[in-house]
Image: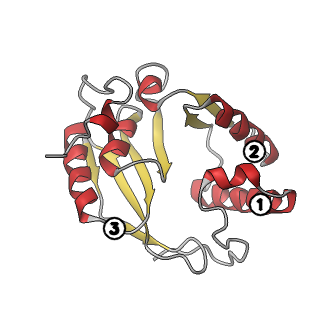
């Protein structure tokens, strides 16, 4: 189980991005401080760039402001649906796709696979393990050219419970029929019988 060492600033109050939209200045400063720490830990060395894909333009504006405040000049908010971005400039463009509290594993795998380069990885941050979600996630991964690894239990802040990272590595090209048109991944998820 992984836990951020000395992470006394994380108390779980920023469990969802939406919480950051209506917080006090002092909480925002704490959030940005923790975000910088997590970014440095997660990336090791500064990457060439971060693309933060978000379909809602208003949220992209907030993301851009937060990236500026966090002093991340190499972070760009992309106002697009994952499916649309994967069909254009985002196709096979990423070493890593990270998703948190977004959707089910089959849907996350379908969003990420067309974005990933060969040998790239999807890292999906999820809550408690659920075999009813894991099994379709594995089935979807195989259709998409992804290889799932065993879930990794994590403890990102004191008092957190049942948090897991799901890592899928792209081991073969994603079939040409992906990405499907917007909304189809959630309407008809892969791996669901």
Query: Which residue was labeled with disc 1?
Result: 33
Dot 2 or dot 3, earlier in sequence: 2
> Which residue lies at the image location 38% right of the left edge and 37% below the top edge?
111
Instruction: Tell me: residue 131, above or below residue 70.
Output: below
Estimate how packed mark 2 is, as few (under 14), some (14 to 19) or many (20 or more) residues with alpha carbons within 10 Å: some
Q: Residue furthest top?
A: 88
> Which residue lies at the image location 33% right of the left edge and 51% below the top edge?
105
Instruction: Tell me: residue 74, above or below residue 176.
Output: below
**Residue 60 lies in quadrant:** top right
Q: Residue furthest right?
A: 25
Estimate how packed mark 1 is, as few (under 14), some (14 to 19) or many (20 or more) residues with alpha carbons within 10 Å: some
On screen, residue 11 versus residue 169, left or right, reads right
The image position of residue 140, as x and y in percent, is 23, 44
Which sits in the foreground, 157 or 189?
Answer: 189
Query: Dot 3: what SS?
Result: loop
Query: Which residue was labeled with disc 3?
Result: 129
Q: Nearer the viewer, mark 1 or mark 3?
A: 3
Q: What separation in Å lies between label 1 and label 3 (alpha carbons)?
A: 29 Å
Q: Residue furthest left?
A: 193
Query: Dot 2: what SS?
Result: helix
Dot 1 or dot 2, earlier in sequence: 1
**Residue 146 lies in quadrant:** top left
Q: What separation in Å lies between label 2 and label 3 (alpha carbons)?
A: 31 Å
The image position of residue 149, as x and y in percent, is 30, 59
Q: Nearer the viewer, mark 1 or mark 2?
A: 2
Query: Which residue was labeled with disc 2?
Result: 66
Dot 1 or dot 3, earlier in sequence: 1
């Amino acid at each position: 189980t992984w836990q951020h060492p000395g992470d006394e600033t994380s108390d779980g109050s920023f469990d969802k991005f939406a919480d950051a939209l209506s917080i006090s200045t002092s909480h925002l400063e704490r959030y940005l401080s923790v975000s910088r720490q997590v970014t440095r830990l997660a990336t090791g060395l500064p990457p060439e760039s971060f693309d933060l894909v978000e379909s809602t333009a208003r949220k992209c504006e907030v993301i851009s402001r937060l990236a500026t405040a966090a002093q991340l000049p190499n972070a760009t908010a992309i106002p697009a649906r994952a499916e649309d971005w994967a069909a254009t400039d985002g196709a096979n463009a990423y070493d890593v796709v990270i998703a948190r509290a977004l959707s089910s594993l089959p849907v996350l795998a379908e969003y990420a696979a067309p974005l990933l380069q060969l040998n790239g990885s999807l890292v999906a941050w999820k809550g408690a393990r659920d075999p009813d979600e894991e099994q379709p996630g594995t089935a979807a991964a195989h259709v998409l050219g992804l290889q799932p690894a065993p879930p990794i239990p994590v403890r990102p802040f004191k008092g957190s419970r049942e948090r897991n990272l799901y890592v899928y590595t792209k081991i073969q090209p994603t079939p040409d029929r992906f990405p499907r048109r917007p909304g189809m991944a959630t309407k008809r998820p892969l791996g669901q019988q």
